[in-house]
Amino acid sequence: MANAIASTVGVRERRPWTPSNGRREGWNRAGDGRGGRRATRTRTRTTTGARSVETRRRGVGSVRGRCVAASAANGGERGAYVETQAGRWDRALEALATEVDPSEAIALLDRPLPSHEEIRRGTLENGLKYVILPNKVPEGRFEAHLEMHVGAVDEREDEQGLAHLVEHVTFLGSRKRDQWLGSGTRGNAYTDFHHTVFHIHAPTTNKDGHYMPPNVLDILNDVAFTPQLLETRVAKEKKAVLAEAQMMNTIEYRVDCQLLEHLHWDNLLGTRFPIGKLDQVEAWPAQAVKDFHARWYFPANATLYVVGDFDATVDEVEEMIATAFGEAAPAEGAEEVGSPLERHRVRPPVKHAYGAPSYELEEIKRMNEEAKAKALEDPFMPFVADEGKVSMFQHEHLSNASFNIFSKLEIKPLKRMGDLYRTILQRIVLLVLQSRIQARYAETNADYKRVELDHSDSAREGCCVSTVTVTCEPREYEFALQVAVEEARRLQKFGLTPSELDRFKAAMLRDSEQLAQQAGSVPSLENLDFIMEQDACGHVVMDQVAGHEAMVDMADLLTLDACNGMCDELLGFIGEYGKAHNRSKNSGMCTAIVACVPATMTDAKGETVPFDITPERIEQVLAADYGEITEPEDIYVPEVLVSDEEVDTLFANMSPEFVEATYHEPTGVYQRTLSNGIRVNYKVLDAEPGSAFLRLVVPGGRSLESPEIGPGGIGASAVGLRTVQEAGDVGSWSRKQIELLTMQHLLVYDVEPEVEYLFMDSAFATDGGLRTILEIIHLTLTKPNWDEQALERVKDIYRMFQINTNKNIELLTHETINAVIYNDRRIMDPNKEALAALTLDGVREIIEKQFASGALELNIVGDIIPEEVDDLVLAFMGSIKTKPSPPSLVAPLKLKDVPADDPIRAQRLWLRDSDERACAVAAGPGPSMWEPMTKLFNEIPSFINVESYTPEQIAALKDPVNEVAAAKGNPFARQSVRRANPLATYCAGMMLAEVVGGRLFTTVRDALGLTYDCNFTMSFGLQNNDATTYRLLVTSTPEKIDDALQAGVRVMRGFKTQRVSQREVDRARLTLLSRHEMDLKTNNYWADLMQCTNTPDLAPKKKIQCIADLPLMYDAMTVEDLQQVYDRLGLGEGEMFTSVTIAGKEEPPPYLSPKDVDAAALAAQTLTAALGGLNIAEAIKKLKEQSNT
């Protein structure tokens, strides 16, 4: 578990900056732009897709887990080959010999895990299996996912990518899908190594009163078993797949492919990626799609998962399933194309080479020898791997070095208490090791280093994998690997300290307890995904309460000896690398090492030089003898950071009080103003029992930075804030102490510098967590520790950000647009020159001025007690000495004034890359978030004879009423009232973005086949600034990117003649309202909503009433409102900016725009006419002849 107050500033996923992707703009969904490089998109409109090869394992590397596994009744799961009942718990009993009576321990460890009582499983007569789980979150909605047990590993040599193409064609080839998708119902599909999944998310009853479960099940049946596999659709989806391949072929994807290729050198998982081979995709006829579908799409090869609020009994849902799927049968001609007509015994159908502990490897060898002697062939029997050697992937687009050390193991199905016990021990050991390594990285020097550890089962890969990933500056790789090896050896030799065990054990029990409290609030989608994954692994799915009870029953068995006994087994693959003949019998073995490194690095002088590294040297570093390993010190961890006596002193000195305290009935939000000027908003929300979310908003942010390079110039706010976090210690407490204390309270902490403010976010367990985070904030604001090495580490991170941006096609394209639209470095990460100029004193000054401001706003949401919040806020926030905010001497962010015919409006870039890709962005000015709608009343058309109308009729023409909204009693049904609301532009703009996105998908992707993904956003990110833009993002092939961009621009401009339709408005409204209703069940979304409602200087128009008005405003919006916002977009030739980036091995020839081509053609025609009708070649020849005479 990451404790961000004390964790190293990591290489965050870089995101192109636009005001809207600052996820703190207060209305967009928190977290939607946080983990991806295409974060400018506010909607996901891809219809189908190959699931990324990024490994998605649910394991013991993190504390969280939603259900605790349940015997997979579905079949097709991978069973344990070397699991034996005899002596099953011998190692556990050995560790517990002095703690527990053996018979009692055996009885507990051998007790079966209780299956989730509410899960209903069954099988239809045609072989289709189903899983049903009633779940009330979100209320009035349900999930239906049909899993076809066919994926990329089932393809033949000449079918690579065919499973994915069939997914596209079947999903979009359904005759019934379009009848119900939309109107609050969403559908999608994905293909992975081991399966293809079609999923629908729907309201139980839609807006027209239709009861949806039978319809949704009927759609899934039609998609899977009776689709229209038309040649026209196949041709269209082949184009889409080719465009998708271009879009997803980022350097991160290529790294993922390298990891999987070398991890799974022993089977098809290393080569059969879902996207397939594009030359094969282009060549397949429609018959290939039909044959593959006939071979694999039969009922016995499917499992249906239905989870949600059905408004029906489970028996009735079973009847609906039987009605929808009971007549499904294998396709005609299935046997002729080689269909197995029954499900595979093992999924995915591959065999693995394992690096298990010696005692298990001996058993694997014995089984293989026995099978060989009996001439038995088992295609899935594992074999023993040799110790892994280093494979290296070196690429110019990588900026830091990562070393991935793997040990592939067999999945151990979680079926008994002893299996769960073993998993918990593994989790504790991994958390301790990660904490130790990261602490040493932070203590050593200023260069960036980070470690991640994982040990988890993967259904998609059919195995368990232990992973140590070290990421670092290239020049520091030897030291970074040495630290990881040393700490693994230290933990193997000495084990955990008593304090570590107490803290991590308490954290896991606290986490388990919180999950039990939240048993009734887990979203249906989370539950469904977890059940599907656990079923495939052969685990037992327990409900959260039963899982917590099991944890409590085992708490006394979580001893030091038991944890220390797990260290060898779990960590030997890295701690004993290279010691093949001197290895502990319990140690696992490394099966693969993959180094992903850049082609160049920055040396100590700041110069770019080649990065010389060899696989042999990496192996030497991992196997080296680093001398005597010393025993770790135990660390004292305080219960509180500010004692009660210190709190009393603070109260006596400051006499804090609330000068204003209100409660807003429509939203349930408490608002407070402290005597030192700090504002507080909080809300009690029981949707996530036992947890809460906090956001501190510090007005100022990067807008206070000087536009010049200097000690406190460009980048000072961004770098300074992260330096405080990176230092990790506050007051008199060390980083390690803070880290262990936050872990105990499940407290995670993050900071982010935005243009208009700084923010600090924290999620925590409410039992003790609120006091701890307020203590940390109090000490951070009043006694921050400024550390020179922390500053240098943060600078190092930002230098990598710049390198990443220059090597990432999407980031580079957006950065280019930002540079020409804003011409302001405050919206971009500081560059190398700005970073070099920053000093510790310079960044300290700008941050401490903001920290001392009385304009701070604290937002708290969750399972909290108002009286406790008031007391703690008074103590820790009211006792902070504040000063009036200094007037800003820096010009506000604004759009650059660029002449209409300036060539910088059309940017073209080339990025050297081994693979071809292309990306384009179009942008222009748009209305700001809080800009008023100026046209409160309609203008009566001149052709209307007003004399023939009554005054009431004229008033109705000038100020129309949305009759549908009025019938619901919506107070914003009348146009003048609605447009006078400060949310009018924002709501209309968000709905317009949905409408534009829909047309872009229909035209550019579906009809023209020019792109796989095309997105439009309104950059509503700035609270008190007019520098707002819209963005159009398209990705395609280099040959098609200009056509795709032009098609997207035509769609946007097309709204002038083909106006927004009522159907589009209704669909956008329902999408946004459905999303809003679902997100209201989360703490961080409420923090988004409350943010800045109590900061009159930063967001004077955002009042607490806006939260209550938001859904009503969406509901009342009309076609004319959206068109009003559209008319304020700068879409003309002299208003729009474009940037096209093409990546490839060779720089493309100069681009000729349609205007250039037309001008050239006109010139040719003119010259031809002038020369008597001759063509150009003949004219030139004639001129030469004349010149020679």
Image (cartoon, grey):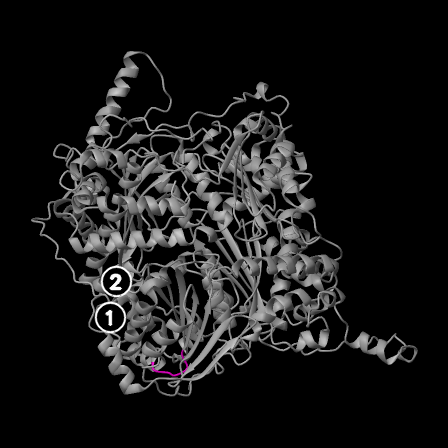
Q: Which mark is residue 741?
A: 2
Magenta region: 852-856
Local secondary structure at mark 2: helix
Local secondary structure at mark 1: loop
Q: Position of residue 965 (x, y in %)?
A: 71, 66
Where on the picture, by quarter, is residue 1131?
Answer: bottom right
Which residue is at a point 27% across and 26% down the rendered structure image? 84
Q: Nearer the viewer, residue 824 or 964?
A: 964
Q: Is residue 1012 visible?
A: yes
Which residue is at a point 14% across and 48% down the rendered structure image? 490
Q: Nearer the viewer, residue 135 or 381?
A: 135
The numbered mark, 2 or 1, whose residue comes first in the sequence reads 1
- The kind of residue tagged 2 is Leu
| Dominant secondary structure, magenta | loop
Q: Nearer the viewer, residue 505 or 380?
A: 505
Q: Which residue is mark 1?
A: 641
Q: Position of residue 589 (x, y in %)?
A: 22, 36
Q: Badges 2 and 1: C-beta atoms under 8 Å apart?
A: yes
Q: Is residue 1164 visible?
A: no
- The kind of residue tagged 1 is Leu
In reply to whether residue 1143 is colored magenta, the answer given is: no
Please state, as top left, top right, bottom left or bottom right, where the C terminus lies in the image.
Answer: bottom right
Q: Position of residue 795 (x, y in %)?
A: 29, 67
Residue 522 vs 1129, above or below: the answer is above
Query: How busy is the neighbourhood of tag 2: few (under 14 within 10 Å), some, or many (20 plus)?
Result: many
Q: Position of residue 732 (x, y in %)?
A: 19, 72
Where on the picture, by quarter, is residue 793?
Answer: bottom left
